[in-house]
Amino acid sequence: MEKSLDAFRTISEAAEELDVPQHVLRFWETEFPQLKPVKSSTGQRMYRRRDVESVVRIKQLLYEEGYTIAGARQHLRDEVRGDKKQVALPFMTGSPADLRQIRQGLQEILTILSPRH
């Protein structure tokens, strides 16, 4: 029986699906703040879709890309911060004549916008 993408998985189901031992998942929970499976009323760890996606990324960083635990943790932090960074605007590399024309246009706009006395 196939689980839907939004369904919760027990730690044993997640471990089997991700080909990672359960004890490794429990350890990673202590090392990676973004990995926080909810616990059922009986205290059983329940992995959500985003938890599974986090484990996939952690596994990739550690096993495929060769990061240490600390390096992977920092890389994941940087990825999150990178999504929030503002994109720099490209500066025009124009001639002095182009810059004078832009300056003149801006001054005209200021004149139009400034209150008349």
Image (cartoon, rainbow, N blue to C red):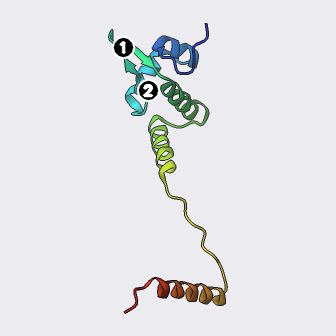
For disc 1, the marked residue is 40
Quadrant in which the C terminus is drawn? bottom left
Q: Select label 1 or label 2 by which is in front.
A: 1
Q: Is residue 104 left or right of residue 74?
A: right
Amino acid type at image mark 2 = Trp
Classify mark 2: residues with Cα within 10 Å, few (<14), some (14-19) or many (20+). some
- From this view, report whether residue 43 is shown above or below residue 99: above
**Which residue lies at the image location 61% right of the left edge and 6% below the top edge?**
1
**Which residue lies at the image location 48% right of the left edge and 40% below the top edge?**
76
Mark 1 to mark 2: distance in Å? 19 Å
**Which residue lies at the image location 58% right of the left edge and 30% below the top edge?**
63
For disc 2, the marked residue is 28
**Where residue 10 sits: x, y (%)?**
46, 13
Using the image as rendered, state which of residue 48 and residue 30 is in the foreground.
48
Residue placed furthest toward the top: 1
Look at the numbered disc 1 and give the secondary structure of its residue.
loop
The mark that comes first in sequence, 1 or 2, is 2
Q: Is residue 112 left or right of residue 94?
A: left
Look at the numbered disc 2 and give the secondary structure of its residue.
helix
Amino acid type at image mark 1 = Ser
**Where residue 89 sits: x, y (%)?**
57, 66
**Where residue 73 sits: x, y (%)?**
45, 38
**Which residue lies at the image location 52% right of the left edge and 12% below the top edge?**
13
Hey, which quadrant is residue 44 in on the image?
Answer: top left
**Where residue 38 sits: x, y (%)?**
38, 21
